Amino acid sequence: MKITYFGHSVLKVETNDKILLFDPFITGNPVAEKITTADSLSPDVIILTHAHFDHWGDTLAIAERTGALVVGNHEITEYAYKQGHENVQPMNTGGSCTFEWGKLTQTYARHSSSFPDGTYGGNPNGYLLFVEGLCVYNSGDTSPFTEMAWIGEDHDIDLAFLPIGDLFTMGIQGALRAARMLKPNLTVPVHFDTYPPIEADTDAWQSSMNAVSLATRVLKPGESFDL
Ligand code: NI
Ligand code: MN
């Protein structure tokens, strides 16, 4: 599995000859715009955690150009369908869906969700991604919540993506609390440094994580790594 980070919560996962793209906010994303364009991304699957503009982003443009399958909660896939994109897979919190390339389980997230035009986006979500015998958790925008302990108990998480930027999500202290419940083998921070209000002290976060024996890796925008 090859993972590429484009800043904010934009993650590309290449696995089993498929390209999965989480929360493709490229246009208008000051970090992502420096390293890529929406036109240069050709995913097979687009996976949405919620409908906010900084996650929904270029979904429709990319989906229309590539025909990608759009995965999200009922409200998000219904919105995409009504905009003319029929290749969708709705899910809802707690449900799993098996695809030819792997499995997704939609998890709870404590946040809100509406589209840029104000349309209700349903409840926000995170995802557990099961591929290649690995388990990857992308929490989506959230604060810590106590059921993260169940996720940590029930799954051996190889990699977790957690927001650390504060203000709209948990900050470094909340992300530490989340990671202590999830117990991932590796945690990569997201949703920080896109704009000044969500700048985060990654050194302080890494120190706090490492102090309780939790491994971290901070990805630069555009950086890839193999898991
Ligand atoms: Ni959000
Ligand atoms: Mn967000």
Image (cartoon, grey):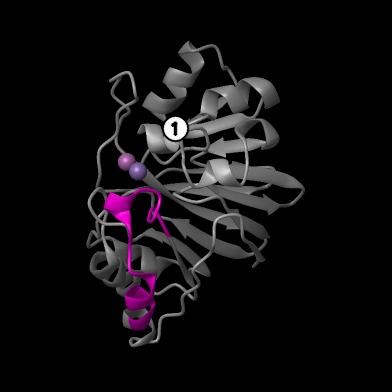
Figure quadrant, ligand 2? top left
Residue drawn at the location 25% of the way across and 60% of the way down? 144
Q: Is residue 159 left or right of residue 191?
A: right
Residue drawn at the location 41% of the way across and 81% of the way down? 214
Q: Label 1, secondary structure: give it.
A: helix
Mark 1 and ligand 1: say if the CB distance to the nearest ligand atom is below 8 Å: no
Q: Where's the N terminus, which quadrant?
A: bottom right
Stretch in magenta: 190-207
> Circle 1: is it few (<14), some (14-19), or many (20+) Cα within 10 Å?
many
Q: Is residue 26 left or right of residue 223?
A: left
| Badge 1 amino acid | Trp
Which quarter of the picture shows residue 21? top right
Looking at the image, residue 41 lies above or below residue 3? above
Point out the residue furthest to the right here.
17
What percent of the width, then of the height, locates residue 100? 69, 43
Q: Determine if residue 91 is in view.
A: no
Q: Where's the C terminus, which quadrant?
A: bottom right
What percent of the width, then of the height, locates residue 192? 37, 56
Identify the residue under disc 1: 56
Residue drawn at the location 26% of the way across and 58% of the way down? 170
Q: Determine if residue 63 is in view.
A: yes
What percent of the width, then of the height, locates residue 81? 50, 16
Residue drawn at the location 27% of the way across and 51% of the way down? 197
Looking at the image, residue 129 lies above or below residue 28? below
Q: Is residue 18 left or right of residue 5?
A: right
What percent of the width, then of the height, locates residue 84? 54, 11
Looking at the image, residue 40 lies above or below residue 211? above
Q: Could you say which is closer to the camera, residue 2 or residue 167?
A: 167
Q: Is residue 198 magenta?
A: yes
Looking at the image, residue 22 lies above or below residue 77? below
Q: Is residue 47 magenta?
A: no
